[in-house]
Amino acid sequence: MKILVINGPNINLLGIREKNIYGEADYPALLAYIENSAQEFGLEVECFQSNHEGDLVDAIQSAYGRVDAIVINPAAYTHTSIAILDALKAVALPAVEVHLSDIHQREEFRRLSYAGMACVKTYCGLGFAGYREALKYLAEHYSNRP
Ligand code: CA2
């Protein structure tokens, strides 16, 4: 089973500021963590990060017919992007939403997730472990499906 893991704007800056919210570890450490988690569940992963909304839409479209599922942290576009929501609906692959922080315990504007409306599951507030949970969920619920 192959999974596309998509991260949105500023996730590449992890570990340099706001460590109280997002933790100490940097983006390369997140990539290593995702790769280790994928191996644990016998999954193949491809990771993509962009600061640009259209590139994230292109990445979601590129998943169609090529991968089996998506894990996505759209970062700030979570709360604004109907384009990302529509792309997730269009490809109609099982998608799991991940947020490092608990978006429900922060500013009011972070509570609304458009992307989440097209996702089968959301993990938030677990830090890196949210990505592991997302991969585990997909392995348990969607592997061995045609
Ligand atoms: O908690 C999450 O994973 C978020 O998706 C992270 C986004 C934020 O806009 C969402 O509301 C929740 C922010 C991405 C990382 O931002 C940084 C800010 C400062 C330093 C490093 C990264």
Image (spheres, helix red, strand yellow):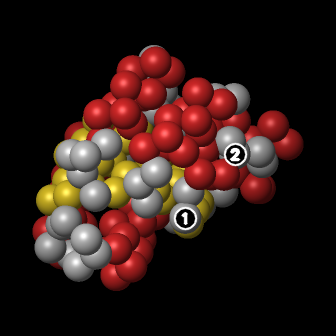
| Residues packed near mark 2 inside 10 Å, few (<14), some (14 to 19) or many (20 plus) | many
Q: Earlier in the sequence, mark 1 or mark 2?
A: 2
At x 59%, y 51%, the residue is 118
At x 20%, y 58%, the residue is 2
**Amino acid at the residue labelled 2:** Ser
Is the C terminus in the top left, top right, bottom left or bottom right quadrant? Answer: bottom left
SS of the residue under disc 2: loop
Residue 68 can be seen in this image? yes
Q: Tag on residue 113?
A: 2
User: Foreground mark, 1 or 2?
Assistant: 1
Q: Position of residue 128 (x, y in %)?
A: 40, 58
Q: Tag on residue 94?
A: none
Mark 1 near mark 2, Cβ–Cβ under 8 Å?
no
Q: Position of residue 142 (x, y in %)?
A: 34, 74
Is the C-beta of the residue carrying label 1 under 8 Å from the nearest atom of ligand 1? Answer: no
Q: Position of residue 37 (x, y in %)?
A: 24, 67
**Amino acid at the residue labelled 1:** Val
Is the N terminus in the top left, top right, bottom left or bottom right quadrant? Answer: bottom left
Task: Look at mark 1 in the image and give the residue it sits on.
Answer: 120
Residue at the far front in the pictured view: 146
| Residues packed near mark 1 inside 10 Å, few (<14), some (14 to 19) or many (20 plus) | few
